[in-house]
Image (cartoon, grey):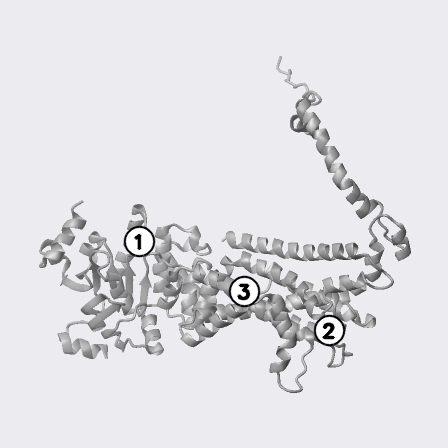
């Protein structure tokens, strides 16, 4: 189904759309948190979402794996339409990995248990295979020697790398990052960004909500700027930073780049 | 010159009165005249208080002999406890069948040891405690090849332990379910949970016990005859469940919402994330109040005396009124208090050790 959408939209040379949001709206009570969101993310694309706080960036990506429920419009993930149906939600969540600002590792489990839990319970993987898989991902994020520790014994940067590895163990088709470096001390931001850049270079489809403009410039295919619940501007990083089309983008960039 | 070796003389002992207990006493109690006087006064006061207690408890006490010997003596009558120990422990349980409650106590000790040492997984613990409850009940009541013993014969420490252990073991899982029910997204379940919890919490335990013995039979089907022990047990379980539910709810509220979100994002189902992610952390956070509820329940069972059951305290009171050993209430209650204290203090220490295991993570 996703391929059909891709063909009808952009022709043969474009990779298929993995995520399709059409006219998505969300309200918290009377507050209109997301307005008329249209966004298509194709396989292998790296999207950076930025904007002032309260602009709806986090809400947007949390709607994609249904941590938040949208009230109007449609969201397709990997061809599956997100509705109230538990089956669809489960299917989508298995294909979408997510990293949180506060890492959200399971604090009563060891690092290894954090990584093997979902593959064993959700993917029904044999325990031995899950451990092998987990150790291989822990090696990739340079943290294999800490596998029997508890999350509270690791630094913030290490915890976030574990969280990324935990998501990757589910072999997701898309990774969502919700301000993954915002809770980190400056010296730990780099180690997490390096892992994310590696991931991008391997062709992972990614949507990152982040204020790391350096990351956006070097990795993103597109930058999406949001304000007041709307997508204000969507452009390539070069155009976005050097030649913003909208005043609101200009003033946002002035604020975050001025110092 | 070369074969001269320096050999140090052995150290001299420190001057007397400058080290050890003598120096410590000197510094803390006899530093000057004033503190020496205070110390002596204090010693006299301590002796004045403890002297009579010491002679009553130990020096003048009667350890063997009949009630006549006790009445003649000044001190405590510990021979009364010795003579009536079976009554205290087993109530009126047939004396030739005492191996049954003793075996049940041994099984309880083994199950508790297995749980406390954590050498078996959680699921096995649940199975062990369930089996303990069923086997103990069989040992108490009989049937299936054992001579049956009516519940009116159950009493003493055995009854207290039965009411408490079954109360705790049953009300913890029920309380957890109720706490989850109160947070349920399904309005009816959450409403019913709130109604149950708030109703029970608004009623004193004594009232619940009266209601269980008098009102419960009115609601039951004709011919269904439930003995007082069971009705009281149900009352205790209901009471304890409501309180444990509130303790667990406190633990659930303390868990960061990010834990649930992370479990959701990984595709874990609602039950799996509750059982494996949320509950273990919530329960670990409320271990201390949870153990507190268990201790309170153990002590609260003494209230069953008001509906005529002879639990540990009830039997102690009755024993002191028996014709043969009339009037040794003080000894009976002191013995009771000592056993209650040992049980509760043991539980409390166990709770502390659990918290330390949790803190080590």
Looking at the image, residue B314 sits to the left or right of residue B122; the answer is: right
Callout 1: chain: A
CA distance for labels 3 and 1 = 45 Å
Residue B29 lies in quadrant: top right
Query: Residue at position x 87%, y 62% from top?
Result: B324
Which one is in front in this view, the residue at disc 1 or the one at disc 2? 2
Q: Left or right: where does residue A16 sit relative to residue B159? A: left
Residue in the picture at 20% in, 53% down: A213
Q: CA distance from mark 1 to mark 2?
A: 63 Å
Is residue B288 visible from the viewing direction of this image? yes
Name which quarter of the figure residue A227 lies in.
Answer: bottom left
Q: Where residue A168 sits: x, y (%)? A: 34, 64
Q: Residue at x 28, y 54 (%)?
A: A193
The reply to the same-chain question for discs 1 and 2 is no
Are the residues at dot 1 and dot 2 in contact (C-beta closer than 8 Å)?
Answer: no
Front residue of this view, candidates A133 and A190:
A190
* Numbered mark located on residue B328 in the image: none
Mark 3 and mark 2 in contact? Answer it, CB < 8 Å: no
- Position of B292 relative to B227 (above/below): above
Chain bearing tag 3 is B
Helix, strand or loop at disc 1?
helix
The chain identifier of the residue carrying mark 2 reads B
Q: Which mark is residue B243?
A: 3
Specify few, some or many for label 3: CA neighbours under 10 Å numbering under 14, 14-19, or 20 or more.
Answer: many
Q: CA distance from mark 3 to mark 2?
A: 28 Å
Res. B18 visible in picture? no
Residue at the image position 12 percent from the left and 54 percent from the top: A250
The residue that disc 1 covers is A192
Q: Nearer the viewer, residue B331 or B125?
A: B331
Q: Along the polypeptide, which appears first: circle 3 or circle 2?
A: 2
Same chain check for tags 3 and 1: no
Residue carrying label 2: B140
């Amino acid at each position: 189904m996703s391929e059909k959408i891709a063909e009808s939209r952009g022709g043969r040379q474009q990779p298929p759309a993995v995520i399709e949001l059409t006219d998505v709206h969300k309200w918290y009570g009377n507050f209109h948190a997301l307005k008329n969101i249209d966004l298509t993310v194709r396989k292998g694309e790296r999207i950076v979402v930025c904007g002032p706080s309260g602009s709806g960036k986090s809400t947007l990506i949390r709607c994609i794996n249904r941590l938040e429920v949208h009230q109007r419009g449609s969201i397709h993930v990997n061809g599956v339409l997100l509705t109230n149906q538990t089956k669809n939600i489960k299917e989508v969540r298995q294909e979408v990995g997510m990293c949180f600002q506060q890492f959200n590792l399971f604090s009563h489990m060891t690092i290894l248990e954090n990584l093997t839990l979902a593959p064993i319970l959700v993917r029904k993987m044999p325990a031995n295979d899950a451990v092998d898989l987990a150790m291989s991902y822990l090696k990739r994020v340079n943290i294999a020697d800490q596998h029997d520790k508890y999350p509270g014994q690791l630094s913030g940067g290490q915890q976030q790398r574990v969280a990324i590895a935990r998501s990757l163990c589910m072999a997701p088709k898309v990774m969502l990052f919700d301000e993954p470096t915002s809770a980190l001390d400056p010296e730990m931001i780099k180690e997490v960004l390096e892992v994310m850049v590696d991931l991008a270079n391997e062709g992972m489809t990614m949507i990152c909500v982040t204020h790391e403009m350096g990351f956006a410039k070097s990795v993103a295919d597109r930058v999406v700027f949001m304000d007041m619940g709307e997508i204000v501007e969507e452009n390539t990083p070069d155009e976005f930073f050097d030649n913003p089309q909208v005043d609101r983008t200009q003033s946002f960039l002035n604020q975050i780049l001025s110092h | 010159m070369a074969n001269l070796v320096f050999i140090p003389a052995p150290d001299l002992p420190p001057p007397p009165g400058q080290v050890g207990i003598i120096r410590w006493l000197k510094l803390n109690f006899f530093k000057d005249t004033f503190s020496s006087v205070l110390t002596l006064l204090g010693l006299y006061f301590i002796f004045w208080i403890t002297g009579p207690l010491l002679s009553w408890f130990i020096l003048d006490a009667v350890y063997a002999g009949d009630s006549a010997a006790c009445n003649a003596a000044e001190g405590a009558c510990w021979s009364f406890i010795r003579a009536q120990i079976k009554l205290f422990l087993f109530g009126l349980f047939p004396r030739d069948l005492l191996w049954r409650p003793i075996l049940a106590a041994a099984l309880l000790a083994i199950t508790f040891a297995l749980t406390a040492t954590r050498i078996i997984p959680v699921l096995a613990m649940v199975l062990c405690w369930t089996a303990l409850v069923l086997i103990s009940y069989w040992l108490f009541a009989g049937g299936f090849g054992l001579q049956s013993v009516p519940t009116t014969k159950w009493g003493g420490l055995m009854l207290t332990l039965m009411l408490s252990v079954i109360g705790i073991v049953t009300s913890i899982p029920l309380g957890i379910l109720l706490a989850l029910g109160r947070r349920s997204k399904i309005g009816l379940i959450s409403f019913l949970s709130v109604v149950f919890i708030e109703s029970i919490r608004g009623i004193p335990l004594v009232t619940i016990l009266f209601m269980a013995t008098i009102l419960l039979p009115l609601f039951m089907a004709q011919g269904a005859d439930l003995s007082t022990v069971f009705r009281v047990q149900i009352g205790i379980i209901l009471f304890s469940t409501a309180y444990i539910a509130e303790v667990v709810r406190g633990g659930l509220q303390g868990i960061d919402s990010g834990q649930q979100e992370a479990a959701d994002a990984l595709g874990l189902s609602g039950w799996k994330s509750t059982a494996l992610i949320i509950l273990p952390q919530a329960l670990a956070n409320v271990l201390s109040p949870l153990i507190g509820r268990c201790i309170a329940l153990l002590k609260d069972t003494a209230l069953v005396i008001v509906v005529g059951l002879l639990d540990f305290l009830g039997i102690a009171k009755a024993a002191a009124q028996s014709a043969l050993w009339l009037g040794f209430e003080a000894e009976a209650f002191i013995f009771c208090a000592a056993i209650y204290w040992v049980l509760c203090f043991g539980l409390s220490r166990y709770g502390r050790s659990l918290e330390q295991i949790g803190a080590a993570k």
